[in-house]
Image: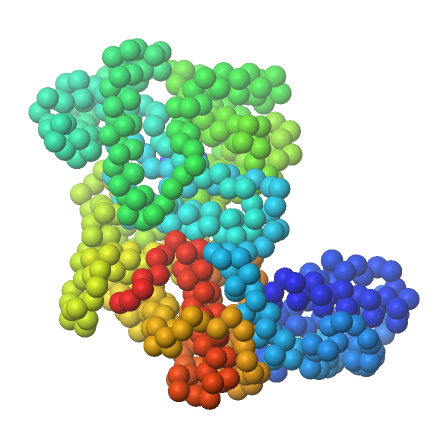
Amino acid sequence: MLTNVRRATAEFLSTVISSHFSLASLTTEALEAALEVPKKLEHGHLAFPVFPLAKELKKAPPLIAKELAEVVTKAEHPLSKEIASVLPAGGFLNVTFKDAYLQKILIDSVYAEPGKVGYSKKGEGKTVVIDYSSPNVAKPMHIGHLRATVIGQAIRNLAETQGYNVIGLNHLGDWGVQFGKLAWAYMNWGSEYDFKGKPFESLYALYVRFHDEAEKDKDLDAKGSAVFRQLEQGDAQVTKIWKEFVEISMKEYGRMWGLLDVSHDLVRGESFYNNRLKAVEKELEDKKLLVESEGAMVVPLGEDMPPCLIRKTDGASLYATRDLASAEYRHNELKADLNLYVVGVDQTLHFKQVFRVLELMGHVWAKDCHHIAFGMYRFKEGKMSTRRGRTVFLEDVIRQAIEMVDKLIEAKNPNLENRKLVAEQVGIGAILFNDLAVDRVRDVEFDWEKALNFEGDSGPYVQYMHVRCLSLIRKYGKPAPKSIAIELTSPEERELVRTLLNYQDVLAAAFTTFRPNIVAQYMLELCAAFSRFYNKHRILGEAEDVQTSRMALVEATRRVLEAGLRTLNIQAPEAM
Ligand code: ARG
């Protein structure tokens, strides 16, 4: 239900409750938070559970509900005239609004602020930092990075709908001993590769070759580590090579982000924290948290967790140390009220350790740091790793999806305008929706047929519903009506209105739980509700007032579909 209706209902009820019962404890805010949206329309549009009142008044909930229903029905309030019924049902008070009222506020709300359907102001004045995508230099993005990228971008979009100031951060993996190895490989074998023509492929080939050869030649790793030490000491030649690796890689990732329409506000690679690590170590030392263990420096974390490694025996810094510095940076300098890390479930222990260390350091804001974990991709052949040959590259999956959609268009609608663009929007939409529709902590089963099925629970299906609305509006031939002419009262119309009014709640719930799948599942429900309406009722060619009212509903649906797709970072094609 829309926030303003919720708010108005809570005010109304709290006025009635406080004048009827002598109670002080139930605030309008608490009441508003307690209002539920019943699963079925028979139970009204909003339900108020009277249990807390019953407890305080020491009366049975059904009795209170009955008494309250009577007084609310009789009460004089601006909202009274919009309410069709207030009925007791067990321990609940079910409020049903008049159709005309809901239809009016629905249409008003979708036109209120263009491009901001369903937005709220909950996060106003607060900053959320979201770390997503964050790939590792020199490694191609594989299908596993898809989740870190699209779940992250979707949560970013969701944060925007809640009114937060959002900072999207790329914690680029650009530091660590692997760059010493890579630089060694570059200095020794680089000339054998086409760095001018195919820079990124060459870089990755060097990476793979180094690891293959290191298995045979036991001295190679040590040589790589030595070069990394030079890099850590700021050696000019090695630094120059390293910078080139970063540049080549960022260009490649930029292409991928461009395809997916993903962007960051800030790049703060791991190397950014190099000159802050000493301070972190000193802070840990001052707070008596740092201990020596077999030559390395660690923070012990108690029985239930292995210690957090801060500095290696050879003095090299670590992933965790950089994350500690980064968390402080996000809090102190970026002023993050919420600090989110969209990273695979395989790094759960790492984040638990980092957050525990922050707690031990006395940072109360550690509780505002959240690891937004997600499961892995599973193809029929099993999991994949970057070093071995079985990797499924992200770009290949994207290209294949686009190609497959293009073939489908060729078969079904060969004269489609902008065919190339549509194939891209639908192909990428299919992959994104397939990913985002799954609860993020679960693994994603990748199945081409399911992802590209235009009739199933897929991205193309949702995009197709949007196109259907658009083509109705085109046939209508006039701008979509901005108001409803008569009350629409069929079950399908009521259900569609109710579903549309839930969109704002859906966004809020998806952000609070960091679960974009709530939006994706809602989109499927909305499509189903729209289909039932569309299949049952004639729209064009009906009496003028019926036609106008139904067209207003079509446009409202179209706007919510478009907004929902945008939140999931999926394009809404004009035709397909
Ligand atoms: N670069 C890492 C990887 O690809 C992810 C970084 C996540 N962010 C962080 N602050 N640790 O596995």
Tell me the quadrant of the picture where the C terminus can be found. bottom left
- The residue shown at (49%, 38%) is 167
Whereabouts is ligand 1, in terms of quadrant?
Answer: top left
- The residue shown at (53%, 21%) is 280
User: In this orientation, which residue lies closer to the viewer: 502 or 184?
Assistant: 502
- Left or right: residue 351 compared with residue 434: right
- The residue shown at (74%, 58%) is 29
Name the spot of residue 214 as percent of width and height, x first.
19, 26
- The residue shown at (29%, 33%) is 250
User: In this orientation, which residue lies closer to the viewer: 186 or 211?
Assistant: 186
Q: Is residue 374 visible?
A: no
Name the spot of residue 20 as percent of width and height, x first.
88, 71
User: In this orientation, which residue lies closer to the viewer: 563 or 309?
Assistant: 563
Residue 542 location, quadrant: bottom left
Q: In the displayed structure, would residue 297 be above or below residue 429?
A: above
- Left or right: residue 235 compared with residue 544: left
